Amino acid sequence: MKKIVVVDYGSQYTQLIARRLRELEVYSEVIHHTEDTSLEDVVGVILSGGPNSVTVEGAPDLPNWFQKVKVPVMGICYGMQLLVKNFGGKVDKTEAAEYGRTEIRTLKCSSIFENVPRNFNVWMSHGDSVVNIPENFDVLAETENNIPAALCSKDKRIWTLQFHPEVRHTEHGMDIIENFLFNICRAERSWTMEKFLEEKISEIRETVGDSKTILGLSGGVDSSVAAVLVHKAIGKRLINIFVDHGLLRLNEEQEVPNVFRDKLGLNLDVVHAKDRFLNRLQGVTEPEEKRKIIGKEFIRVFEKEAKRVGGEFLVQGTIYSDVIESAASGKETAKIKSHHNVGGLPEKMNLKIIEPLRYLFKDEVRKLGELLGIPHEILYRHPFPGPGLGIRIIGEITEEKLNILKEADAIFIRTLKEKGWYERIWQAFAVLLSSKSVGVVGDERAYDYVIALRAVNSVEGMTADWSKIPHEILDEISRRICNSVKGAGRVVYDITSKPPATIEWE
Ligand code: XMP
């Protein structure tokens, strides 16, 4: 299959380049700049951006196979500067470092800017700039500061962009990538999710061989897609483990096995560990302590199960946003919550990790899930945290509170679905406050729990805004909860964004 090679110089946007190529149905492979590649079937090469400066000794250089390349090459940001330096031009630190939105103007017609206006805004992120262009190169576009924004060699083989066409903030970025692929490289549209699936399946088969592998299935989008994908590759030799820790949403402990075992035919073991978890959590009110107990207990249960079923591999539903997030969370980052480590299994388990979704973005994972026949309700379900309802009951967790919260949460979600609001919201759930509030039911004084409703719109949960659910719908939810959930006496709506608040209450 014809392909584009994307050479990675460490930019946070490298996988985004690959993703844009997939959107245009072009097959690509991302390789590290020190990695070797056969140039067979390669119709174009893209050099990514990166955090280094080509002016510094020892900065990453062109791949050692670069001299053999006869096909078109496009260098983006660091990739551009590297090409300029190697073709005899000069890059240097200039006063005019450019970050963020910048207007550029094209200076002449060229196939890379076909169907793109003369002036448009692009996303820049560079401290160094091209100060001398190489001989036999033309400037195709420049910024307001007269810094070259795009160059092309006179033989029309080497193309360079100082800005990032792969980033949404760059106007016409997709047109530029499309021009490079189809006008310049003559790439073909051959990448489809079906092909990706086929390839992943044979890759997993090859990796796992005759061994067994395990997977912790939560019923969330990512672990569900990973489970069905690996099941398709190796069948019952994938053993899925679903831990019912008692902190799941209403009826989830029945629904997950029902879908995955009975409908989709997966090999699924359910571990009933509710009592174990609730006993350990008895009397605990501190959020961090609750998280730690749930996390530790989860690992203990999982380790025991893994030992019981055996297996050489562990499948994880890591997706690309998790990869970026963990790369971004440096040591200095303040610990807001001991997050995402629930289900993060210890290295000493000695299992080899398989992450088949590692380079896919969430919407691509959903698309793959659709292709695998996973029901819509699972693929478009709101995210649910590992510690589950344990962090949605403020203070001590008891069975009574759990039952109240499950009922209230189910009513909230059901009503949102009925009113067509569920898929307009990124995440919605109910929280139970342990302080009680006075009410009047009939002629009697009531003293019941407060239910807080939380609904947010977000992209991947890093920041969030509270959802503007119409008052009539909130009214209906509140009445339904108060009328039918015994023990819930008052309903409030959380109107705080993140930051300053977090999405979960604990
Ligand atoms: P916060 O509350 O930090 O949540 O704004 C952001 C997103 O992360 C989810 N979340 C978790 N997910 N384990 C998880 O797997 C956790 O411990 C955890 N804590 C929060 C939260 O539901 C939201 O989607």
Image: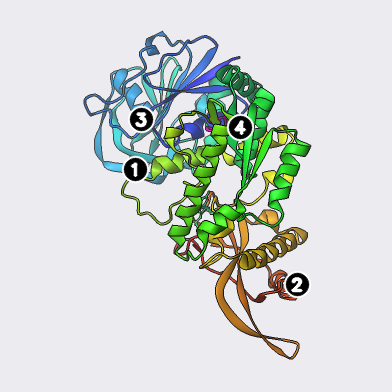
Quarter of the image with the N terminus in it: top right
Residue 22: x and y in percent read 59, 29
User: Compared with residue 393, is residue 232 higher up or lower down, i.e. above or below?
Assistant: above
Residue 429: x and y in percent read 62, 61
Mark toward the start of the polypeptide (4 vs 2): 4
Circle 3 sits on which residue?
Answer: 78
Per the rendering, the mark at residue 23 is 4
Circle 2 sits on which residue?
Answer: 484
Mark toward the start of the polypeptide (3 vs 1): 3
Q: Marks 1 and 4, Cα distance to the nearest angstrom?
A: 28 Å
Q: Predominant secondary structure in magenta? A: loop
Mark toward the start of the polypeptide (3 vs 2): 3
Q: Amino acid under label 4?
A: Glu
Mark toward the start of the polypeptide (4 vs 3): 4
| Magenta span of residues | 355-359
Taking the spot 52% from the left edge, 67% from the top edge, the residue there is 396
User: Compared with residue 423, is residue 62 higher up or lower down, i.e. above or below?
Assistant: above
Q: Marks 1 and 2, Cα distance to the nearest angstrom?
A: 59 Å
